[in-house]
Amino acid sequence: MATNSTRPFGKTADGQPVTEYTLTNKNGVSLSVINYGGIITRLVTPDRSGVQEDIVLGYDSLAGYLKTTPYFGAIVGRYGNRIANGKFTLDGQTYSLAQNNNGQHLHGGVKGFDKVFWNIQEAGRGKLKLTYLSKDMEEGYPGNLNVEVTYELTDDNELKIAYTATTDKKTVVNLTHHSYFNLTGNVKRDILDHEAALYSDKFVPVTKVLIPTGELKDVAGTPFDFRKATAIGLRTNDKDQQLEFAGGYDHCWVLSSSDSIKHAATVYEPASGRVLDVYTTEPGIQFYCGNFLDGSITGKRGVVYKHRFGFCLETEHFPDSPNQKSFPSTELKPGEVYKTYTTYKFSVR
Ligand code: GLA
């Protein structure tokens, strides 16, 4: 059975206290979360000899998270990933969002769900329930959106995330989680030796500003073929237009569009033996390899986060879905319940 504990995690500039909640399971695996951004600040798992180390990037204290952070560990919404030109239309009405990334809208805007206070309740041993009310027109999105995210740490070393949302006006929703993993333990080096498998035949090609072209492309014969586990660094510097546009892997892979939970990815780190498996009900998974990390951030334990020191596996709908009629829909209407599940499972080989 997991145990729960809390500790103060500093105060925001306007004096609001932040609390860190820690869940620990019977194997000593632990997960820490703060009520600011719903951020996972620490995730400690054993290597193959049982050494417990932190496998996510982040900061030692709140101050780092309050500065501009590249979404370390956060809940991302109302729309995770990009919306072209920050515009979309619902029932003939055009909505304008912040153009906070190369003229495009990214990760919910200037003050997305990664920068708001979540109400956290302990929902039994090993389980936290986070809730947030995103008001009508917050960051330009229509509808009062009631969001609930639960984090559950099981004794099988799984982090189970469930996302629920309801609205009182038609809107778009695409929630995801933005942990940067580094399975070496306490971030010893970059992630290029990690071996990744993505159980997907197709990916979503993008333009120079990382907006989907609208097609879904076969991975066969491209550096995007991860159907067999391959070292992340093997092809990331290949001469390939898609890799050049994104500076490496920063793309959405297509999963089956069925609502059932499916195995999306496995990442293995040969030196520590750590394995991360991802399962999701979502139709896509964004695999981002820390191409924008450049050594300007010093994180936990004084480690400098250089180029490709972490990877994200963001389970989600495809980028720019509100403007791409052929993509699975991200619309949510009053009376409907948005519900998605993602499991990150930790093991060793
Ligand atoms: C996502 C995006 C990336 C980048 C990171 C944050 O993964 O796809 O392009 O914006 O978030 O730096």
Image (spheres, rainbow, N blue to C red):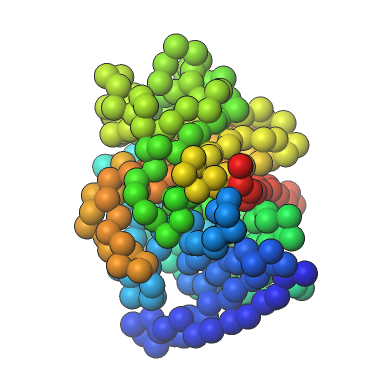
Q: Residue at the location (27% across, 59% down)?
A: 304
Q: Residue at the location (48% across, 66% down)?
A: 41
Q: Is residue 169 visible?
A: yes
Farthest residue, direction front: 49
- Count all numbered tags in the image, as a single digit: 0
Name the foreground residue: 72 vs 266: 266
Tell me the quarter of the picture where residue 143 sits: bottom right
Q: Position of residue 176 (x, y in %)?
A: 54, 50
Q: Position of residue 166 (x, y in %)?
A: 67, 56
- For the N terminus, give its image quadrant: bottom right
Q: Residue at the location (44% across, 11% down)?
A: 221
Is residue 285 left or right of 111 when viewed as pictured? right
Is residue 343 left or right of 335 when viewed as pictured? left
Name the foreground residue: 94 vs 57: 57
Q: Is residue 137 visible?
A: no
Is residue 278 left or right of 235 when viewed as pictured? right
Q: Determine whether 241 is above or below 246 in the image.
A: above
Q: Position of residue 87 (x, y in %)?
A: 40, 42
Farthest residue, direction top: 221
- For the C terminus, give its image quadrant: top right
Name the foreground residue: 126 vs 270: 270
Tell me the quarter of the picture where residue 155 sits: bottom right
Q: Position of residue 148 (x, y in %)?
A: 65, 62
Q: Determine whether 326 is above or below 338 in the image.
A: above
Tell me the quarter of the picture where residue 285 sits: top right
